[in-house]
Amino acid sequence: MKRLFSALLSVSLILCVVGKGDAVWFEERHDYDQTSQSLGGFTWLGEDFVEVLDFRNYFDWYDTFVLDDFDPAAVGINWAELTVTHWGNISTKRRPELWIVSQQATNTLIGQLSPGCLCSWTTDTFSLSDGVISEMMSHNPWQLALILSEETGGLDLLKLDEASVYGDYQPVPEPTTVMLLGTGLVGFAVPRLRKKVKK
Ligand SMILES: [Ca+2]
Ligand SMILES: [Ca+2]
Ligand SMILES: [Ca+2]
């Protein structure tokens, strides 16, 4: 009976630990403003922004999101999205404009910015694929390095208000949980050892 109780206790403690801990929310947000602007000093439709100009056929603009403040510490990212709030990306017959968002390291396409309207800011949300997320986690600290590129000719003009990488992640088990696991294993092992000794 005692052994049965001990075994049940062990199993319940182990189950307690094996069950995944609650996922934790994370967000890294870049609120762009005019600090990096040579022409700066104004807002557009109520928002501070950085202006990305392209007079060439090929143009890349870079930004890196460093994910270095997980609290509690992270084991892995479960899912993540990227949002970009922009104005521009307006195509005319004479002047095509198509801004593309990619992951820098592997040049993986994340998505295209949707066509802008002149009247308001546009926010696009991109779901990050497992491949993009695992590439992010191959850096120390984890990071998402973005490229915004525009490869058509003519003048292209994009204003960026903000961009954000967010999602949820699996935290490392807390020490108390690890101790519980230890206790559970001991509870499980001791009766077995006793049984062996008796034999
Ligand atoms: Ca271009
Ligand atoms: Ca163009
Ligand atoms: Ca802004």
Image (spheres, rainbow, N blue to C red):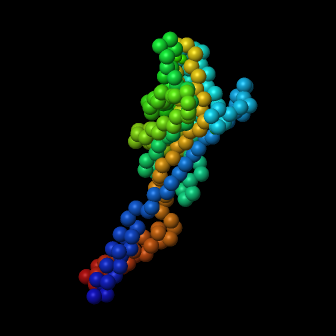
x, y (%) of residue 105? 50, 32
- Number of residue marks: 0
Horizontal side of residue 61 vs 108, given as left or right: right
Quarter of the image containing the N terminus? bottom left
The residue positioned 34% from the left and 82% from the top of the image is 6
Work out which residue is located at the far bottom of the displayed protein and give it: 1
x, y (%) of residue 75? 48, 54
The residue positioned 52% from the left and 43% from the top of the image is 165
The residue positioned 59% from the left and 44% from the top of the image is 29
User: Residue 188, relative to residue 47: is it above or below?
Assistant: below
Horizontal side of residue 54 vs 133, given as left or right: right
Q: Is residue 98 visible?
A: yes
User: Residue 23, relative to residue 182: is it above or below?
Assistant: above
Nearer to us in this view, 56 or 193: 56
User: Residue 196, relative to residue 77: is it above or below?
Assistant: below
Horizontal side of residue 85 vs 13, given as left or right: right
Q: Name the image quarter holding residue 129.
A: top left
Work out which residue is located at the far front of the displayed protein and give it: 119
Nearer to us in this view, 146 or 81: 81
Horizontal side of residue 123 vs 37, given as left or right: left
